[in-house]
Each structure stands twice: as structure tokens, then as C-alpha cells.
Amino acid sequence: EKKCKKLFPVARGCYGDVSVTSGIMAASTMLLACRGLGPWKSFCFRPGCVASFGWQSGSVRFSSSEAVYDVVVSGGGMVGSAMAAALGNDAHLHEKKILLLEAGPKKATDQLSKCYSNRVSAITPGSATLLNSFGAWDHICSMRIKPFQRMQVWDACSEAMIVFAKDNLEDMGYIIENDVIMSAITKQLDAMSDRVEVFYRSRAVGYTWPLPYQTCDASPWVEIDLADGRRLQTKLLIGADGQNSMVRKAAGIQNIQYQYDQSAVVATLHLSEATDNNVAWQRFLPSGPIALLPLSDTVSSLVWSTSHEHASQLQDMDEESFVDSINSAFWSNTDHSDFIDTAGSMFRSALSLLMPSGSAARQLPPSVAKVDPKSRAVFPLGLGHATEYVQHRVALIGDAAHRVHPLAGQGVNMGFGDIECLTHHLSAAAFNGKDLGSLNHLLKYEQERQRHNLSMMAAVDLLKRLYSTRAAPFVLLRTWGLQATNVATSAKEQIMAFASK
């Protein structure tokens, strides 16, 4: 490695953009030895030779007949589809060939189910701006969307709470079904079919990576083998293929992951009576947070993170018992203690003397009447983060790069943040006539997004752990911390601003 870095100081771990000329044959051989890439093919040092070769298991020679794209996005979920749409909408990328690969069939966009889906996302204003930038937001607004103006979070082990709300009752965010978001993005992709190709039922089964120097008998681009036998080439491959990303694994990027001792129970709930239902509710139970997210004046979505055993029980119990468990989780004070309540009350009184107008009034959560049949589902929770977001001609976005606990509702918003950042840097590269697959601008994307995502993941993980204990010292600490933050208006504004990015 040291020899590599001396030979190629601009290379990032010997993956940088390094050109081979007739004067540095020895250096090329040394690079191969350093990276352990053999066996390798013969080189071309003729003037004007611009082809390069890749390493792979099995020798595949370059064919000029293979389709070459500027960008291929692998994975057609919410984040992958939005990535393709954002690229297709960018003025500086209009002349680029962009392809979206999706293993599944095309989803119907002309019919919206009468029943609400049990998988929803809390979309921040920042994510809404991204969706609006390429035209998907208008489609969402014409289907189903529920804004919320307030978020109330409180502790099951004390009276401590915090309320987030914007001035003049502006929308804090939007609860939207994932199916609605996907339908809106798909409609917009259809509208820009002249700029973005979409291959449905197209699954990638192998990748061939280019070396960062040039030879004659192989492609300089990433080669993608599809299950149906087709082969594509791309100057930049964007992996948006989820937490079990094949792109990430094939590129040899390590993923640091941890499985929480929790599963999330989701369901669609009907309230006892119609209300404005413009508040997102979340209560931290010792077993995990429970959230009630508004979908309409009478319907809300449940996201309950709890132990695997309890999650299984909740899924199997009858409807009446399930509804009773939800109402109890929001209303019961069985985890309170007199000591914590007294200490919290005294601290709250002291704060009210120092900051008499800083505390927001407590609201009571709505009562749940019934659950939609067959809307209950359970999925395991975990934490994951890729050690690198980019390599030569490869970038990761969304769950392929990071996975987070749902307690802050930041999962898809972090993915949309990746899209905004990566599109910005690719647009600038195209405007300046640069190679889209170059690490020069991909590294800028990595640095910006890792800085934000790691901070968010650390904060969410800390909250999860802090609220997973009944130990009195920790309960008292978080009680005082929550009460103090609730009266600190500037601190709450900074939290909301960070979460909205």
C-alpha cells in the first residue's frame, strides 16, 4: 500500500483515477501487485489507446455493441426511483443516458386502493422540496397526504414531554403512504421517458469493475450482467438496492451492522372519533417507542417498536385485545414512580420560573377504536452503515449506505438527502465536462452525507438506548433533559432544522 501511495498520491486507496502510459509500465505492474488483482491481461501502450480493463472472476472481453449508459441506478424503490427522476430532471444532465433497473414489475399508477397501506413515511419539508423539484409532489397532493403541525413526544416512566411545532402552525411534515410516493414518482418517470429509461423485471446478477488505468481489450466502464442474459455498461453505477445491497457487496464495501433486540409492529388504525388529527404522537415505553401517525381525520398509522416476543404476541392477538394494548400503551402510567414524578415536578416548576413562556401545553392522544383487518405486520429492526459510500464509478444511496431505527422517522428522508446531494455534485460535474464516475466529486458527496448521516444515526441510537431502561438515574436524567429542551425554543428549532435536511 505504501508503494502504491508513493506511485499514485492522488489515488484513494489505489482506486483513484490513474492513467497508464508507456512511461509507467512498471508502476502499473506494481499497482497490480499491491492490490492483489491478478491474473491480468496484456496491456496496450499504443498512442491513442483509451480502453481499459476490469478484474472479475472469469475473463469477459469488451464488446462495443453493449449498451453504454452515463448513469445506471440499481434498485427501483422510493429512493432509487427518485434518484433516477432527479437526474432526468436536471438541466445539466439532459444529454446523458440514464437507466433505472428494477427487479420487480411496474406498479399500477392509475388506481389508488381504498384501504390505507400499513407502510408509511414521515416526509420532512426538505424531502418534500426534493419531490417537488422533479414534479412528483403534485401527484402526491392529488392522491393522499396528511400534513401534521405538531409532534408530541413523552416518557412512559415520567411526566416529561417535548412538543415540536413551527410558528404560525406551519406544516412540520407529511405522513404519506409509501405506495402513494412510489406511484407519484413512477408517473413522473413515465413523463420523462425520453430522458430516463426504466427496465422492469430486470435483475442484476453480476458486476465487472473497471481498473483505474487503461488497456485495450476491455471496457473502461462498469459492466452489468442481467438475469435475462443482457449486458450493460455504465460510467457510474448508483446502488439503491436496499439494506442487503448487491452493489455494495460486489464492490467489496464493508457494512457495519447491528441487529436491535426489537421488531416493529405496523398497522392501520381507526380512531374513536373524528378530530383534526394533525399531531404526530410518540411515547417512549421501556420496551421501545410507540408512534401514532395521522393519515386522515379518522385514520392513523401505528409504528410500535418492541421486543421480538411481544411483537409476535401483538400480531397474533385478537382485534379487541390488540386495540386495548395500544390504548394502554399511550395512556397507562404503570411505569411511573413517586420519586421520579416528584423530582420531575420540582424541576419543571423551577424551569417555569426561569422561562415562564417556554413550555408548550400537553395534549391528550386520541383513543383507538379498531384496526384494519390484515393490516398488522412485523419486521425486525437494526442499524447499518457502509464504511464507504463511493468507489471508482460506484456510489451508494439510501438503505444501501445506511439503516436506522424508525423512532425518528428519518430512514427515507436520509435517502432523499443523499439524492439531493449526489444530484448536485453530478450536475456540477456535467456542467464542467467532467467524468461522472470520477472520485473527485463522488468523494464530496460521501463526505457531506456521511457527516450528516452519522450524526443522525448516533443521535437516534443514543435515544433508543437511553429510553430502553427503567433504571432510576437514567430515567431522572432523561426526564430533566427532556423538560429542559422543551422550554429551550432555540434548541428545539435547531433540532427541527437538522431533522429537516
Image (cartoon, rainbow, N blue to C red):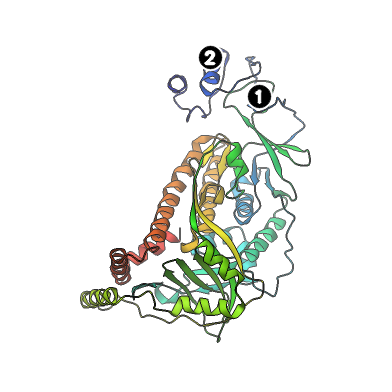
Image height of 210 relative to 157, above or below: above
What secondary structure is marked by label 1?
A: loop
Q: Quadrant of residue 78?
A: bottom right
Q: Position of residue 37 (x, y in %)?
A: 58, 23
The residue positioned 39% from the left and 59% from the top of the image is 465
At label 1, counting other C-alpha atoms closer than 10 Å, the crowd grade (few under 14, some 14-19, many 20 or more) is some
According to the image, label 1 marks what residue?
51
Q: CA distance from mark 1 to mark 2?
A: 17 Å
Image height of 21 relative to 96, above or below: above
At label 2, counting other C-alpha atoms closer than 10 Å, the crowd grade (few under 14, some 14-19, many 20 or more) is few
Image height of 474 relative to 5, above or below: below
- Residue 216's disc number: none
The one nearer the camera, 398 or 124, is 398
Instruction: Check disc 2 and give the amino acid type.
Output: Ile
Which numbered disc flags the more N-terminal residue, 1 or 2? 2
Left or right side of 298 for 285: left
Q: Is residue 53 visible?
A: yes
Left or right side of 306 for 63: right
The residue positioned 58% from the left and 13% from the top of the image is 22
The one nearer the camera, 406 or 233, is 406
Q: Quadrant of residue 163?
A: bottom left
Q: Position of residue 245 (x, y in %)?
A: 60, 45
The one nearer the camera, 470 or 230, is 470
- Residue 24's disc number: 2
